[in-house]
Amino acid sequence: MSNRHHRCNLCGKDFETGAGLRDHVERRHPKSDVHWWVVAESPERDLQFER
């Protein structure tokens, strides 16, 4: 099991893979200015995200 966690900072949805997140962003937020970064926290915790 991977320790990697992918979350959309625009709506908060979680993904198992970066590819899943990229697909989600292209479909759901095509006109948004997306910034990618690494967060070093446990995915079990509620992480803050933009709305």
Image: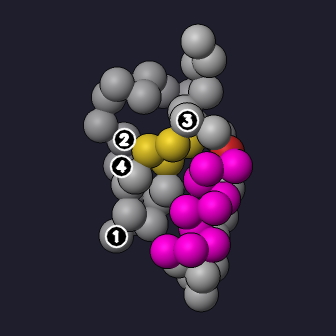
Q: Circle 2 sits in a helix, a strand or a loop, which is it?
A: loop
- Dominant secondary structure of the magenta stretch? helix
Kindly check if marks 2 and 1 are in contact, taking CB atoms under 8 A apart as contact. no
Q: Total number of numbered labels?
A: 4
Asked whether residue 40 is drawn in magenta, I would say: no
The percent position of residue 17, horizontal first and vertical second, equals 63, 39
Q: Residue at x 38, y 54 (%)?
A: 12
Q: Residue at x 55, y 35 (%)?
A: 16
Above or below residue 6? Residue 40 is above
Q: Which residue is mark 1?
A: 51
* Segment tinted magenta in the rendering: 19-28
Residue 48's disc is 4
Which residue of the protein is positioned furthest toward the bottom in this rendering? Answer: 31
Residue 16's disc is 3
Three-letter amino acid code at disc 4? Gln
Three-letter amino acid code at disc 2? Leu
The percent position of residue 26, horizontal first and vertical second, equals 63, 72
Q: Quadrant of the C terminus?
A: bottom left
Q: Quadrant of the N terminus?
A: top right
Disc 2 or 3, which lies upstream in sequence?
Answer: 3
Three-letter amino acid code at disc 1? Arg
